[in-house]
Image: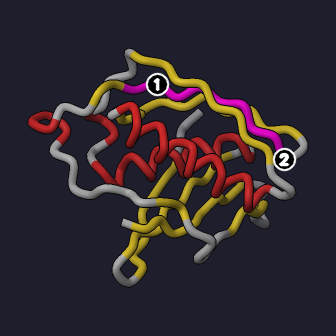
Amino acid sequence: MTLRWELFPHEADVGVRGRGATLAEAFAGAATALTAVICDPAKVGAGEAAHFACAAPDDELLLVDWLNALIYAMATRRLLFSRFAVDIADHRLSATAWGEPVDVARHQPAAEIKGASYCELAVRQEPDGSWLAQCVVDV
């Protein structure tokens, strides 16, 4: 699996986008992009695991819930995440994220994320069969 993720500009905030062969890969890519808003994900170790479970009426709301659960865990546990294993079925997500405590000198955090928003929210299967998961996060 090769995670594909990117950031996109949005006025004062930042868009996060994940792409993958499956919906779960796209959600993992969006989570990696979330970390990239703060720092370079390649600088984040994967020594500590955190488990997540979310459910929503549809996949778009599930993406917002997933990203907000990560944001909450990063803020309250002072962690950054670099690797994600995501399972999705029937608008229910079960995931493990691996990361490490924030090290200001090494990670050089550039922003604090307040939350995932419904702005530019999209979760869809593309014409080539791949999946896209994106939204704007408030920084």
Amino acid type indicated by mark 2 = His
For mark 2, does the 10 Å Cα neighbourhood hold few (<14), some (14 to 19), or many (20 or more) residues? some
Residue that extends furthest to the front in the rendered view of this protein: 76
Q: Is residue 4 above or below residue 134?
A: above
**Can you tell which quarter of the image residue 126 is in?**
bottom right
Left or right: where 94 falls relative to 84 = right
Q: Which mark is residue 124?
A: none
Residue wearing tag 1 = 98
- The residue located at (38%, 42%) in the rendering is 75
- Label count reads 2
- The residue located at (47%, 65%) in the rendering is 137
Left or right: where 108 falls relative to 135 = left
The percent position of residue 4, horizontal first and vertical second, equals 52, 49
Q: Is residue 77 above or below residue 113?
A: above
Task: Give the spatial CA distance, label 1 vs label 2.
Answer: 22 Å
For mark 1, does the 10 Å Cα neighbourhood hold few (<14), some (14 to 19), or many (20 or more) residues? some
Left or right: where 131 falls relative to 58 = left
- Closer-to-camera residue (4/43): 43
- The residue located at (72%, 31%) in the rendering is 94
Q: Quadrant of the N terminus?
A: top right
Query: Is residue 98 a member of the stretch shown in magenta?
Result: yes
The percent position of residue 32, horizontal first and vertical second, equals 46, 44
Span shown in magenta: 91-99
Residue wearing tag 2 = 91
Q: How is the image coloured?
A: secondary structure
